[in-house]
Image (cartoon, rainbow, N blue to C red):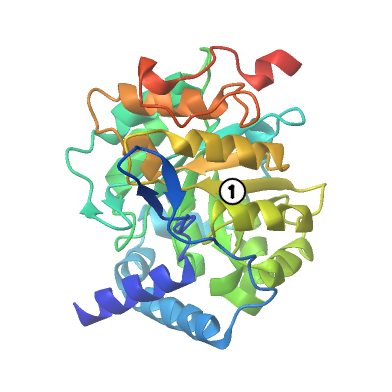
């Protein structure tokens, strides 16, 4: 229990791949929106405490991988087979191709998770196969499955359901979306597990891996996995840009900080940012996504915001994805009104308008 608490604490302090901490929002009696604090520009380098927490997160995660290592040692297990086939997989660009859109157009990564960063287990979470279908119907360009037991709570069974459901759309429109294995990846056995789960890509954190980032990226390629490199400050961005990573994600920061740091990512890389979730009854998060788009972000990962209005039959998550993708603008249209008309905004999407 103590180890679990320390891992969750270290991930929370790091941003832990959890996405934006976001600006906390206060709703005044009149219903207006006021930030509880104004985020500052991200530091150019990680403070010593953050480096220490990264080391702790990595150490604790290593200890939690015993079951995977045991599976890797069993002849004929999917993980053992993946390890044996390392280096035999061709390079893939399925995720990059799916997320890359015309300029000033936003692609969406919809994330499936069973745990909330702040509230623990998400009540009445629908099965992965249902949410996977709804993500695709909403127009998501990729699906992320948050596998870390402490902060994401998804299982192999969830991942299998989602991959199988996406593959059922072969030959249809929209077709299958690539599936991302999202975890605190610290060991090659996790890459083998991702391969065994039929993942298309993995997320690797600069802050967690440090000097081992390049080696883990190379190993992921040998398993046929694309890589999204996660950066939490300007120093992380510089390290990510020094690699050949085609996709760099800004995480663990506010929307304002992501907007400020977006220009630091080279223009030849796909820029990803995470959409926060606010504790209110509006869909301000869609407006944040539009701001990110206007600042040059190419793709956003929507996670807890997809479940903000409850499960229902999954219709709410479809509406949130459509709202994020809509042609809305913070200059000409606001998302600060009540959640009415399903909150979808305009029926046209920027990708459709510019193509």
Residue 292 falls in image quadrant: top right
Residue positioned 55% across, 30% down in the render: 141
Q: Please state the horizontal and vertical placement of residue 89, each as a whole percent of the image.
A: 62, 48
Image coordinates for residue 23, horizontal then vertical, percent: 47, 55
Which residue is painted at 76% across and 55% down in the image? 265
**In front: 77, or 276?**
276
According to the picture, the residue beneath numbered tag 1 turns out to be 273
In the rendered structure, the answer to whether residue 197 lies left or right of residue 108 reads left
Q: Which residue is drawn at 30% across and 27% down?
A: 130
The quarter in which the N terminus is drawn is bottom left
Could you say whether the residue bearing mark 1 is in a helix, strand or loop? strand
Establish if 14 lies above or below 308.
Answer: below
* Quadrant including the C terminus: top right
Count numbered badges in the picture: 1
Residue 215 or residue 90, whichever sits in front: 215
47 relative position to 117: left or right: right
Q: Tell which residue pokes out farthest to the front in this image.
A: 30
Vertical side of 295 occupied by 88: above or below: below
Camera-side residue: 355 or 199? 355
Q: Nearer the viewer, residue 74 or 19?
A: 19
Label 1: how many Cα within 10 Å (few below 14, some 14–19, many 20+): many
Q: Where is residue 60 in the image (x, y as percent from the top left)?
A: 37, 79
């Amino acid at each position: 229990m103590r180890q679990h608490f320390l891992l969750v604490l270290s991930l929370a302090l790091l941003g832990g791949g959890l996405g934006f901490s976001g600006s906390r929002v206060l709703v005044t009696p009149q219903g207006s929106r006021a930030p509880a604090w104004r985020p500052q520009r991200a530091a150019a380098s990680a403070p010593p405490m953050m480096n220490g927490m990264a080391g702790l997160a990595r150490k604790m995660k290593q200890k939690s991988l015993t079951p995977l290592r045991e599976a890797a040692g069993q002849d004929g297990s999917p993980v053992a087979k993946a390890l044996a086939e390392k280096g035999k997989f061709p390079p893939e660009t399925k995720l990059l191709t799916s997320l890359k859109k015309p300029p000033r157009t936003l692609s969406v990564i919809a994330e499936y998770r069973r745990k909330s960063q702040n509230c623990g287990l998400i009540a009445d979470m629908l099965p992965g196969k249902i949410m996977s279908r709804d993500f695709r119907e909403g127009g998501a360009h990729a699906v992320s499955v948050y596998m870390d037991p402490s902060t994401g709570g998804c299982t192999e069974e969830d991942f299998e359901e989602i991959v199988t459901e996406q593959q059922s759309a072969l030959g249809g429109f929209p077709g299958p979306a690539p599936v991302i294995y999202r975890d605190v990846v610290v060991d090659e056995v996790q890459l083998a597990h991702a391969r065994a789960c039929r993942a298309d890509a993995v997320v690797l954190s600069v802050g967690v891996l440090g000097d081992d980032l390049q080696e883990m990226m190379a190993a992921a390629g040998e398993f046929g996995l694309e890589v999204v490199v996660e950066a939490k400050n300007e120093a992380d961005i510089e390290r990510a840009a020094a690699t050949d990573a085609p996709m760099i994600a800004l995480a663990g920061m506010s929307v304002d900080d992501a907007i400020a740091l977006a220009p630091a990512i080279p223009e030849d890389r796909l820029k990803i940012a995470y959409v926060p979730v606010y504790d209110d009854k509006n869909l301000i998060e869609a407006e944040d996504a539009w701001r990110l788009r206007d600042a040059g972000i190419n793709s956003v990962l929507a996670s807890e915001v997809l479940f903000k209005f409850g499960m229902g039959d999954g219709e709410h998550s479809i509406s949130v994805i459509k709202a994020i993708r809509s042609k809305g603008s913070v200059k000409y249209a606001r998302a600060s009104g009540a959640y009415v008309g399903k909150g979808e905004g305009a029926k046209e999407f920027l990708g459709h308008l510019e193509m």
